[in-house]
Structures are given as structure tokens and as C-alpha cells.
Image (spheres, grey):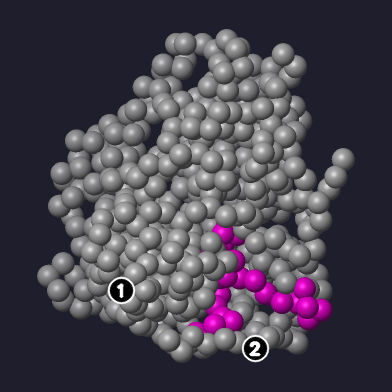
Amino acid sequence: MAQPRVIIIGAGPAGVRCAETLLAAGVRPTVIDEGRKAGGQIYRRQPDNFTRPYAQLYGTEANKAQALHHSFDALRDHIDYQPESLAWNIADGKVHVVSGERTKALPFDALVICSGATDRLMPVKGWNLAGTYSLGASQIALKAQACAIGRKVVFMGTGPLLYLVASQYIKAGANVAAVLDTSPMGGRFSALPKLLARPSVLFNGLALVASIKRAGVLVLTGITPVEITGDADAGVQGVIVSDAIGCSHSFTCDAVAMGYHLRPETQLADLARCNFRFDAETRQWLPEVDVDGRSSTPGVYLAGDGMRVLGADAAEIGGRLAAMAVLKDFGLDVDVGTLQQLRAQRAQMERFRQGLTQAFPWPYQQAAQLPDEAIVCRCESITAGELRHTVREKGAQEANRAKALCRVGMGRCQGRYCGNAGAEIIAQAAGIPVEQVGRLRGQAPVKPLSMAVREETE
Amino acid sequence: MSQRFVRLAETERARVRIVIDGQMVGALAGDTLLVALLSHVRHVRESEFGDGKRSGFCLMGACQDCWVWTDSGERLRACTTVVEEGMHIITRQPEATWPNHA
């Protein structure tokens, strides 16, 4: 057959390894990257006129970051790389891509979606105040811009990223007021057998926590966030939490970094009409895929955290596996030994991920405790009380219906930051399991487009 | 003006000048517009829904909570825009607000 048209969306660890594997087999892909430079969020590159070395930017992951960047730099001239380009729709076998004020439709024979993930958030009263950021945001400020998000920062939420970013802040000389983890200590011990699937990653994690404590920063586990205090003008002024035995603790700060693991960016898979399934462990809806990343839609493949959040190492493997699936489906040869080895490596990472999910669970119970006056939708200032009213008084027990009636999920973030918690609030208010609430439909454009955007025609 | 973000390194870059609400300030080449603004002020916009000031949230172009206005009425997403000499940014909500009274 003629050279197949393969499009990869995303140039993080999954997208880069996918492109590399395809190119090595003689297939020249198009890579659509929303970023200015390849690397994705995890291995995001600093601007050209910054000088910090890899070790300072990426810590224990410096070698991996450097290797990925070098691989991409070697590929760049041999692929069709389109930076600063947003894939905003997928329809009729074409990806719609906007760059600047021009949009064009690119037809494909195979599409590999490596769309990555964003922070998963649980609202708390006051999280709309200026100075509250996602955990990912706090890391980007440091990694890509050499800034701290405030003079005194509280890290609150759960998951490995909480400790990673807090330790990076301390190391960079920022003032960290406290690390407040909603997960109880006990879960970590019971998760140990699974976490031992990746001993070196576990060791790095334990070393991070130790370094935070050594720096004299208070770490509390098993906490429940109560409120981010402050006012509409000045923004964040403090954080109040209650601890495992119900004692209240308050901290003065001018910034809060918040996050509860990640959620995959699945809107494009949705627009490509991939089937989804409910994952009871993480309480999220994920695209259905086979072991190599084939979705239910022929010709559409998924890899990396946008498929299932397994982290950067697994994303590199996932990108390679998806590329091999593409090649195989085009009738090209792939090395069976390599395929099996990659699958086995990822199975180890999957076991480790199960351990992380157990050690740092999504605190969905907090949705029930959220006071009525707390804002759920930051985009349009819609409260938990209004969402509950919509469920109880208007009978909206399904996510899209509740969205239609009260606009939680309708704002500019398109449900990225309220969707997970919104579903939990609906489930709790309706007294039904969260899987019955369903999931917010992906809508094109997946991010707002300017009115000035014009279609480019042949 | 008191700032929100704190620069921890990389401060030896070329200077550029921007204007925030009529006041000229310095920024560094390679800053995102969000960083340039928050190195001088504590917010970049006001919520159209009346709940107060905002300073961005995700820094990765996903939440759209750092949209700012230029003095010529152009709208920019501050976290994904690279600062340029002479940018003139307004941090006040230029249109009516629609407070939520529910």
C-alpha cells in the first residue's frame, strides 16, 4: 500500500516514543503538539534562554527527560511536527487542527491519541480564591518558569505528585508551610506488596517524603480539608483542615497547590467514538482498549496517561506498543520478542499503579461533606448546593442532564476540574452509585476557539 | 504593587517592559504573560460571575482561568502566551458581571 497516513496527537513520552517506533519502521507520522516544544507536561522544557541543568529540573528523572528530548530532536526533521497546534475535533476520519487563527482538517489512516492528563480535583470551600492552583500548575511554575506560586505555599491533596512537588519547592528554596495528605498512613502499608513491583520508584518516593520532613516541613496524613480562607480581593490567606482524630489545624499561607492524582484527557477519544468503561478502582471512565492500545474504533489507538494514568515510564512503553499495533494492523512486521517484553514491563507498572491507588485513594467521600455554599464549578461560580438542588428537586441524576440544568461542567474548562467531583456529588445526592451518573460527553472544540479562526481549504 | 509569584532562579535574562493597568513594569524575556503579571500583581482578572479576583489555576492551558484583556480589547490566555515588549494588560473585568445570587 501507499505510505499510510498516521497522525499522533501529543508529544509527551507516549507521543515521542510512538513517533520514533513508527519512523524506525519506515512510516513517517504527523505529530500534533499543543506545546511549543516536545516533552509534554512531565518533561516540559524550559525556554531557550533559561540555564538550569537537567538534574536541577527533573531530579531523579533527569536522564529519562534528557533521553526523551534527544530522541525527539533526532526525529524532528524526519517527521511532520506541528507545534503550537491544538487537535480540537475528530470527525469523519479527519483530525481538525487549529494553529494561530487557521484550522485545517487532516485525514488519517491511523490515529494515535497521546493526550496526557490533567490534575484531578476535589473542591474545598474557598478553592476559587486567587492563589489556589492545581498541583500540576505549581510544578509548571517551578519547572518551566523558575517561580514559586506564592511566598508561603501549602500542598494539599494526595498522591505521589503531592510529595514530589513539595520536595522540589523546598529544594528550590521556596517556603513550604505544610504538606497535607488526605490519605491515611495505614493504606500505604497494605499497598506495600503492590508498590514493591517497582522497588526503585518506591525508594525514590520514600526518600522524597524523608527529605520533606528533614527540611522541617510539617506533613499530616489522613486529613480532611475544611476551608481555604481569604477574601475575594486579597485571595488565599490560609488553610484549615481537620486531622484523623478530628482536631482542627490552621495554616497561614498565600498559595495552595491542590491535586488528587490525575485524570486522563479523554475528550478526543470520545469524539473519535471510542467506547468507555467505568473503572471501579479509580472511579473514572476510561476508554476501552486492548493490551497494546487499540480502541473500539478501527484505526484509532491510545497511549500514555490519556488512556490510563500509569505515569511517564509506562507512557513511553505505551507509545511504543501503540506504534507496533499500528504497524501490525497495516500488515507490517513487528518484533514479537520486543512486543512481549514491553507488555510485561507495563504489567509491572500496572501493578505498581494499583498500589498507588490503594495507598493514596481518591477521597470521594468528601463530596458528601462539602458545604452547600462551596463552589464546585470555578468557571461559573456554581455551588454544591445548586448542584444538589438540581439533583433532588429537578430529578437530574445523570451528569449531562445535571450539566444542562445547572451548568456544572458547562464552563470554559469543559468539566476538566469539576467533572470528577461533580459526579460524586450527584451520586451522593441521588443516593446512587457513581457509575450510574455516567460521564460528561466530550464536546468539540475540546478547548475554546477564537471567533477569528478560519478554515483552511485545499 | 505586591506580587504573587516568587522568582527562585533564572533572573539574569534580558528585560522587557509591559504595562499593567496603566503602570509600566519590568518582565524577563521568556516569561509567560501569567508569570510576568503575577511577578507584580496578585491577580490577573476578575470572575465574570462576581466571586472575586482570579490568578489562573492550571498553568497548562486547560482551565481557561487566566484569560486577560489587552487595552485594545484582545483576549489572551496568559499561561500559554509568551510576554512581549509593550504588552498592555487590563486586570479589571471590562464588561458587566453576572453574580450568582442562588
Classify residue B91 by image quadrant: bottom right
- Amino acid type of disc 1? Arg
Residue plotted at (43% across, 42% down): A276
Vertical placement of residue A37 versus A81, above or below: below
**SS class of the residue under badge 1?**
helix
Q: Position of residue A255 (x, y in %)?
A: 44, 74
Q: Between A394 and A276, which is closer to the camera in this rendering?
A: A394
* Residue A2 in view: yes
Q: Give the magenta part as a residue range.
A: B47-74
Number of numbered discs present? Answer: 2
Q: Nearer the viewer, mark 1 or mark 2?
A: 1
> Which residue, given by chain and number where applicable, does mark 1 sit on?
A392
**Coordinates of residue A300 in the picture (x, y in percent):** 56, 32
Q: In the rendered image, which residue does mark 2 sit on?
A: B96
Q: Is residue A165 visible?
A: no
Residue at image coords 26%, 41%: A355
- Residue B62, magenta (yes or no): yes
Q: Is residue B68 left or right of residue A254?
A: right
What residue appears at the point 42 percent right and 67 percent down from the top-left corner? A402
Q: Chain of mark 2?
A: B
Amino acid at dot 2: Ala
Q: Is residue A361 left or right of residue A124?
A: left
Tag 1 and tag 2, C-beta contact below 8 Å: no
Q: In the depicted view, which residue is nearer to us: A92 or A377?
A: A92
Seen in the picture, residue A363 relative to A383 is either above or below; the reply is above
SS majority, magenta: loop
Judged from this view, the residue extending furthest toward the right is A458
Magenta span contains residue A95: no
Residue found at x 73% / y 19%: A3
The chain that hosts pointer 1 is A
x, y percentage for residue B22? 75, 87
